[in-house]
Amino acid sequence: MLRWALIFLFISLVAAVFGFGGITVVAVHLAQVLFYIFLACFAVMLVAGLLVG
């Protein structure tokens, strides 16, 4: 999931360089959403690992 967030971030940077504003906004929002989902999953797995282990 973190890989997808980085891919969308890269797409937004490339689109911003070439002046595609609409694509940039969508790609940035997708990257942010995927990054926060990744962080939430990481936190849940970290807590679960500490409780079980």
Image (cartoon, grey):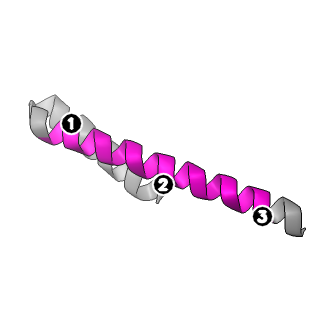
Q: Which residue is mark 3?
A: 48
Q: Which residue is mark 1?
A: 25
Give residue 11's quadrant in the image: top left
Callout 3, which amino acid? Ala
The first of marks 1 and 3 along the sequence is 1
- Nearest to the observer: residue 9 or residue 53: 53
Q: Quadrant of the C terminus?
A: bottom right
Q: Is residue 34 above or below residue 48?
A: above
The first of marks 1 and 2 along the sequence is 2
Residue at 38% x, 57% y is 4
Q: Secondary structure at mark 3?
A: helix
Give, as a single range, the part of the protein colored magenta.
23-48
Callout 1, which amino acid? Val
- Where does the image place residue 21, in percent across and percent down from the top left? 11, 32
Q: Is residue 44 magenta?
A: yes
Q: Nearer the viewer, mark 3 or mark 2?
A: 3
Q: Nearer the viewer, mark 1 or mark 3?
A: 3
Q: Secondary structure at mark 2?
A: helix
- Where does the image place residue 15, in percent across and percent down from the top left? 16, 38
Residue at 26% x, 36% y is 13
